[in-house]
Image (cartoon, rainbow, N blue to C red):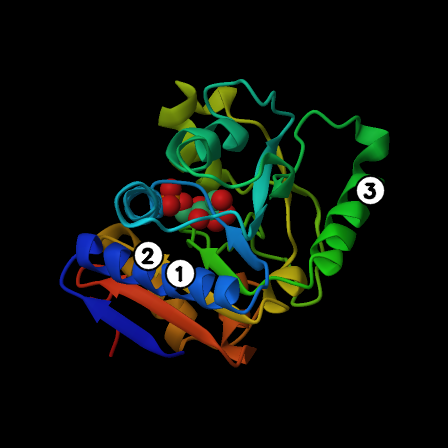
């Protein structure tokens, strides 16, 4: 996997923001929409801050952007403190000129018996938009991308999954205790993610160093779903020095 190692996450985030801005501008100049796949969590917050700055201070418009978020806890009310709907609006969408109808985030309020249909429609909406031009990913300590926990295969699609214990531990502080972390989530599948034309995976800090090593140097296997990125033709793994520390 091609890696780009920066001294710190600040420089890395700014560089990736500028790369995304360039793509949005290039698409706009060609009269095309730009379809972005987006992640939540602590990893992309500085990237989103820079995109907001580029909008507010350098005239970068998001009028031609269509977004699809990777995942959402299930069940989850959109107005909950921990919802990814709320996260995305707070860190990004509310500060941009993206058209509200172009924002897509899996709906954590959907009734259980309608989940399969909702997931099928989510995939359909991605296809109807022309597919994802650039997918932003983080990586969980379990090796998940999106919420594709160990056991998720390369052909998996958007669906309801059960969160790994480690993932729920990592989310515990956001929910004031692990017992409050939802047990399930809706997520794009590994197969859905691999269809993006370009993928940028970000990882910061020493806590990610071990899983980054497994993703980059390990054999492809569903025990670390992020290893399936090895089969994609246009993926960049963007790291800070600490996350790259175990690479040989
Ligand atoms: C979030 C997502 C997850 C996170 C991963 C890392 O939408 O899809 O895969 O990217 O859990 O989370 P952070 O960035 O909080 O370390």
Camera-side mark, 3 or 1: 1
SS of the residue under disc 3: helix
Up-down: is 4 above or below 136? below
The disc label shown at residue 17, or none: 2
Q: Nearer the viewer, residue 37 or 232?
A: 37
The disc label shown at residue 116, or none: 3
SS of the residue under disc 1: helix
Indicate the quadrant containing the C terminus: top left, top right, bottom left or bottom right. bottom left
Which badge, 3 or 2, is on the more N-terminal residue?
Answer: 2
Give the residue at mark 1: 20
Q: CA distance from mark 3 to mark 2?
A: 34 Å
The verdict on label 3 being within 8 Å of ligand 1 is: no
Answer few, some or many: residues within 10 Å of disc 2's Cα (few below 14, many 20 plus, some between 14 and 19).
Answer: many
Q: How many numbered discs?
A: 3
Q: Nearer the viewer, residue 40 or 102?
A: 102
Q: Position of residue 123 (x, y in %)?
A: 74, 53
Q: CA distance from mark 3 to mark 1?
A: 32 Å
Q: Residue at x 65, y 67 (%)?
A: 154
The verdict on label 1 being within 8 Å of ligand 1 is: no
């Amino acid at each position: 996997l091609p890696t780009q190692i920066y001294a710190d996450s600040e420089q890395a985030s700014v560089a990736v923001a500028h790369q995304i801005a360039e793509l949005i501008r290039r698409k706009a100049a060609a009269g095309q929409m730009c379809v972005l796949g987006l992640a939540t969590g602590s990893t992309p917050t500085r990237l989103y801050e820079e995109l907001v700055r580029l909008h507010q201070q350098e005239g970068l418009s998001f009028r031609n952007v269509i977004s699809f978020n990777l995942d959402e806890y299930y069940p989850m009310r959109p107005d909950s403190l921990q919802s990814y709907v709320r996260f995305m609006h707070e860190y990004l969408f509310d500060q941009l000129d993206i058209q509200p109808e172009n924002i897509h985030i899996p709906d954590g309020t959907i009734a259980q018996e309608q989940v399969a249909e909702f997931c099928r429609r989510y995939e359909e909406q991605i296809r109807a938009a022309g597919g994802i031009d650039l997918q932003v990913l983080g990586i969980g300590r379990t090796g998940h991308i999106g919420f594709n926990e160990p056991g998720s295969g390369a052909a998996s699609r958007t669906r309801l999954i059960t969160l790994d214990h480690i993932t729920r531990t990592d989310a515990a502080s956001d929910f004031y205790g692990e017992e409050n972390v939802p047990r399930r989530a809706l997520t794009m599948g590994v197969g859905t993610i691999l269809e993006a034309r370009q993928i940028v995976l970000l990882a910061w800090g020493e806590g990610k160093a071990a899983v980054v090593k497994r993703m980059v140097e390990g054999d492809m296997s569903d025990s670390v779903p992020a290893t399936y990125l090895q089969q994609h033709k246009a993926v960049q793994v963007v790291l800070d020095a600490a996350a790259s520390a175990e690479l040989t």
